[in-house]
Image (spheres, helix red, strand yellow):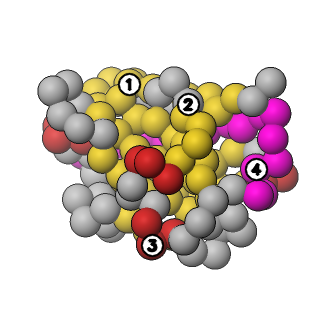
Amino acid sequence: QLQLVESGGGLVQPGGSLRLSCAASGFILDYYNIGWFRQAPGKEREGVSCISRSGGSTNYADSVKGRFTISRDNAKNTVYLQMNSLKPEDTAVYYCARFRGLLSVCSLTNRYDYWGQGTQVTVSS
């Protein structure tokens, strides 16, 4: 059964860190680029970061550059999002999704054919 399952979300104080995981099953992760998105209440889903199949190329939204790091371990069928220096505006549901194609367009939600259910990240004091 095809699955993408996010985990690692939670409540953290401003300036804190979280590491999200995206565990894949039912397909070969190596064949796909993976993206992380987030959606805050009342806002559109936005691209956060993406990573190429091999992990050799990555992209980040300007709002998270220098604070978030995406990585992957294909042997473990898992993609990670390390989030440091978290801010209240990072509060959202975070989703991972898979796509094939150019990494340069990885912020476009219509490029993705399968999504996880999301994990809540709340940054608050």
Residue 89: image x %, image y %? 17, 41
Residue at numbered disc 4: 29
Q: Is residue 27 magenta?
A: yes
The type of residue carrying mark 1 is Gln
Secondary-structure class at tag 2: loop
Image point 45% across, 26% down: which residue?
119
> Which residue was labeled with disc 2?
116
Residue nearest the observer in this picture, 6 or 4: 4
Cα distance between the residues tagged 1 and 3? 27 Å
Up-down relation of residue 116 to residue 20 (above or below) = above
- Does dot 4 land on a helix, a strand or a loop? helix
**Numbered label tally:** 4
Disc number for residue 120: 1
The residue labelled by disc 3 is 104
**Residue drawn at point x = 81 percent, y = 33 percent:** 26
Magenta extent: 15-31
Relative to 98, is 36 on the left or the right?
A: left
Q: Tell us which disc is closer to us: 1 or 3.
A: 3
Marks 3 and 1: in contact by CB < 8 Å? no
